[in-house]
């Protein structure tokens, strides 16, 4: 499985893309494969403040309900409303159309402890 090199990853299988002080967050293809077919996504409201490592929503699949954990802390400035109507996008396009939230970073240093694509690939084998 080829991972996008421009993203950072967590041990909880989220990905993060930084653009200035805005972080776009989603879950990895590996996470989607482990979950199976995603049937529901619950995301926070715009304006919600989240702490790094805290749950910010859930993904429900045919197998389980899993928490989504914020790789960084910040304030939710955008939510991917399209996932509410088409949660299966998480399986089909995890690194593109299936982004989940955009956060205005509380601290840019939060992202420094995240995994590179190579480190994440080593984690998942």
Image (cartoon, rainbow, N blue to C red):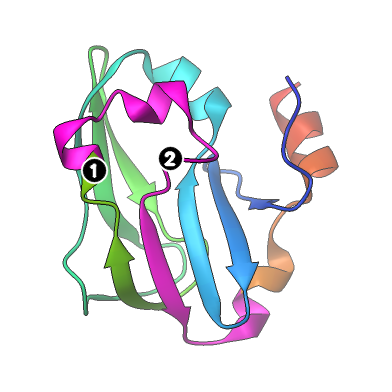
Is residue 25 placed above or below 106 in the rendered structure? above
Is label 2 in a helix, a strand or a loop? loop
Q: Residue at x 57, y 48 (%)?
A: 15
In primary-sequence order, the first of circles 2 and 1 is: 1
**Left or right relative to 13: residue 81:** left
Location of residue 62 (image quadrant): top left
User: Magenta stretch: residue 14 in it?
Assistant: no
For disc 2, the neighbor class at 10 Å (few under 14, some 14 to 19, many from 20) is some
Location of residue 63 (image quadrant): top left
Q: Residue at x 40, y 66 (%)?
A: 102
**Left or right relative to 3: residue 45:** left
Is label 1 in a helix, a strand or a loop? helix
**Rendered image: mark on residue 33:** none
Is residue 3 placed above or below 7 in the rendered structure? above
Q: Which residue is mark 1?
A: 82
Q: Which residue is mark 2?
A: 97
For disc 1, the neighbor class at 10 Å (few under 14, some 14 to 19, many from 20) is few
Cβ–Cβ under 8 Å for marks 2 and 1: yes
Query: In what quadrant of the picture does the C terminus appear?
Result: top right
Magenta residues?
Answer: 83-110
Location of residue 98 (image quadrant): top left
**Left or right relative to 87: residue 1:** right
Query: Residue 119 appears at what percent x and percent y?
Result: 81, 42
Q: Residue at x 31, y 67 (%)?
A: 78
Q: Residue at x 81, y 31 (%)?
A: 122
User: Magenta stretch: residue 85 in it?
Assistant: yes
Is residue 54 placed above or below 96 in the rendered structure? below
Query: Residue 11 appears at what percent x and percent y?
Result: 60, 44
Q: In front here: 27 or 83?
A: 83
Query: In what quadrant of the picture does the N terminus appear?
Result: top right
Q: CA distance from mark 2 to mark 1?
A: 9 Å
């Amino acid at each position: 499985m080829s991972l996008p090199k421009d993203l950072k990853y967590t041990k909880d299988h989220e990905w993060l893309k930084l653009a200035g002080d805005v972080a776009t967050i989603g879950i990895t293809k590996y996470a989607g494969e482990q979950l199976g077919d995603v049937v529901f996504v619950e995301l926070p409201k715009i304006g919600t403040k989240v702490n790094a490592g805290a749950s910010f929503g859930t993904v429900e699949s045919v197998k389980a309900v899993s928490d989504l954990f914020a790789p960084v802390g910040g304030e939710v400035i955008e939510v991917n409303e399209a996932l509410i109507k088409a949660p299966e996008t998480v399986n089909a396009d995890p690194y593109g159309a299936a982004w989940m939230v955009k956060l205005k970073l509380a601290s840019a240093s939060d992202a420094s402890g995240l995994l590179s694509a190579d480190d994440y690939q080593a984690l998942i084998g």
